[in-house]
Every structure is written in C-alpha cells, then in structure tokens.
Image (spheres, rainbow, N blue to C red):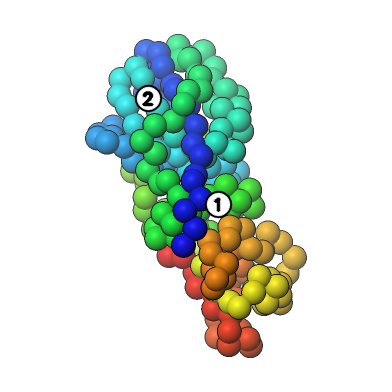
Amino acid sequence: MSDSVLTWACIDVTGEDAGSFLEGQLSQSTDSLGGGKWTCVLDPSSVVISSAWLRGSEDHYELLVPQQCSDVVLGRLQRFKLRVRVTLSVSEARDAPLNSLADLAQTGWPWVAEYERNLTPHSFGSHFVSETISFSKGCYTGQELVGRMDARGASMPWRFADVTGPSLEQIESCIESFGPDGPKGVTTVLTTEPVRAFAIVHRSALSENVSDPTVVIRAVN
C-alpha cells in the first residue's frame, strides 16, 4: 500500500457570527463537535465541492480541507459571507483525520480527484452521507436537492467505486464500456501491484455484467 502523504489546509473561521455563518454553509451542525466531525461544503446545486473536518466552538472554528480544494472552498465561503461578523483565513493544518493513501483505502473516503467530478453526496455512498450530512439541522446552501434525493431513495447514475484489475488500461476499458458519456473513469490510484484504485462508474457497471473476470468493481457504500 502506498504511503503517499495527503496534504491539508486549515480554513480558520473566526468572529462572533462564526457559528451561525457556518451553520448556514455546511451540511453538518456546528453543535457538539467534540474532537471534530465530517461535513460537506456544497455548491447551491448540491454538488460536493469538498468534504471537510470541522472542529472548534463559539467564535473560532477550523475547517480542514484537502490542500488542492482550499482555494475553491474559501472562495465559496467568501461568496456567501454577507453582513456577518466573520473573518476567513488559511493557516497550516494540524492533526488531520486522514494522512495517507493507505488511510483512504482503509476508510473508503473520497479525495480531491473524486470531488472534481461534480457529484452530489449520495453518489459517494451511504457511509459518506451518514458521516457528512445532517437531515435534522436548519437550512444550508445546497440542502434542497440532497434532502429530496434522500427522501425519494434516489438511485444515483454515477457511483464512487473501489476497483481492482491487472492493469489500469483494462480497468479503464471496462469502466468506459458501461453507461453514457459522463464523469466516469479512474480517479485515485491506490496501489500498482496489484492495481487498486478509486473510480467513478455508471451504476450499470456494478451489476454482474462485467465480462472481464479479472476486473472487479465494487460500490463504496
């Protein structure tokens, strides 16, 4: 298993309105954070910009996000920082919840390349949704479609998957053979001997229709 280090940034949210501001911008409540918990930063259409590790209280919260996502997350928060007493800044991240590709593989947690495919939370599986989304808190940006999909038990056309096979070429060929054009394809290579990777696949690729017995595609649930 590769030990490639994951890089994080910390977005500091400070000020007397910090809690109420984040309550309207994140998919989890800012109450009872303890040592921290997962949340999502969504765009208004409910697409996941990034997951984030949220910790803090009262007038100072820390939002740990992948380094490569920090600019877009910061820009997204700045966009909705209207008439609130809040300061946003970026500092060095410490004590991140995941540290390596091995951690991603063990937990089945998406990373930068998966978020770049513009998917909504349910595409990442039930575990991701249960860890990052609150269905009992107040309104937040991007909530409407997420709530509707959950209430209807919608089957997402694109799914986050864990795939194995003898080569990246065979894996990609198999993934491409299912479904229409879209965000499908290998996203994060976890190991090369044997090949194991995360991918976005059409839901039809999760059936028993895979003709290549050397390629295994499993939804991350």
Q: Is residue 34 left or right of residue 139?
A: left
For mark 2, give the secondary structure: strand
Mark 2 = which residue?
61
Crowd band around label 2 with a 10 angstrom C-alpha radius: few (<14), some (14–19), many (20+): many
Q: Quadrant location of residue 159?
A: bottom right
Nearer to the camera, 55 or 91 = 91
Q: Tell me which residue sits at (47%, 53%) in the image.
A: 3
Nearer to the camera, 109 or 38 = 109
Q: Is residue 62 left or right of residue 214?
A: left
Would you say residue 122 is visible in this rendering?
no
Q: CA distance from mark 1 to mark 2?
A: 25 Å
Q: Which mark is residue 133?
A: none
Q: Residue furthest right?
A: 181
Would you say residue 91 is visible in this rendering?
yes
Residue 80 x %, y %: 56, 24
For mark 1, give the secondary structure: loop
Residue 85 x %, y %: 45, 11
Residue 210 x %, y %: 61, 84
Q: Is residue 117 above or below residue 204?
A: above
Q: Is residue 170 above or below residue 108?
A: below
Q: Amino acid at mark 1?
A: Thr
Q: Is residue 129 above or below residue 138?
A: below
Crowd band around label 1 with a 10 angstrom C-alpha radius: few (<14), some (14–19), many (20+): many
Mark 1 = which residue?
120
Q: Is residue 95 above or below residue 198?
A: above
Q: Tell me which residue sits at (57%, 47%) in the image.
A: 112
Q: Tell me which residue sits at (68%, 59%) in the image.
A: 183
Which mark lies nearer to you, 1 or 2? 2
Residue 175 x %, y %: 66, 72
- Cβ–Cβ below 8 Å for labels 1 and 2? no
Q: Amino acid at mark 2?
A: Tyr
Q: Tell me which residue sits at (44%, 22%) in the image.
A: 12
